[in-house]
Image (cartoon, grey):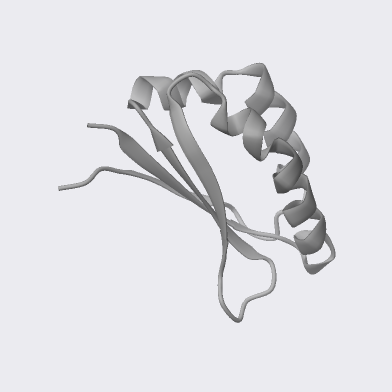
Amino acid sequence: MGITRIVKMSFQQDYAEEFEIFFTKIQNQVASQPGCNGVKLLKQVGETGVFFTYSSWNSEADLNQYRQSEVFGMIWPKVKAWFVAKPEAWSVEEC
């Protein structure tokens, strides 16, 4: 059974649209990582700048491998600078 990773990110208003555009450019890079079964971007209704990534992984080991990858190393520092609050993340599995 795989895991789902949910990450909540709150962006400075000036960067919300830029993040959406950036995500469309990197979505396939993330989805093509070993063990990844797809990644989606969700936006909180009524809250400009609050997004969630929802990604599916074969295992926690695959997720951790991605977090050590060159792709993650290119993405995370860039978007981290745009945050207005510390991101929150959950790894969950179906019951």
Where does residue 66 sit, x and y in percent of width and height?
53, 23
Work out whether residue 13 or residue 19 is closer to the camera in this orientation and state it: 19
- Identify the residue at image location x=37%, y=20%: 61
Where does residue 55 sit, x and y in percent of width and height?
46, 42
Q: Residue furthest bottom?
A: 46
Work out whether residue 67 or residue 34 is closer to the camera in this orientation and state it: 34
40 left or right, relative to 89? right
- Identify the residue at image location x=70%, y=54%: 83
| Residue 60 position by quadrant | top left
Q: Residue furthest left?
A: 95
- Identify the residue at image location x=33%, y=25%: 59
For residue 4, above or below residue 32? below
Work out whether residue 21 or residue 67 is closer to the camera in this orientation and state it: 21
| Residue 92 position by quadrant | top left
5 left or right, relative to 49? left
Where does residue 69 sit, x and y in percent of width and height?
60, 18
Task: Report the number of discs.
Answer: 0
- Identify the residue at image location x=69%, y=73%: 48
For residue 22, above or below residue 20? above
Name the quadrant of the N terminus: top left
Where does residue 13 sit, x and y in percent of width and height?
78, 68
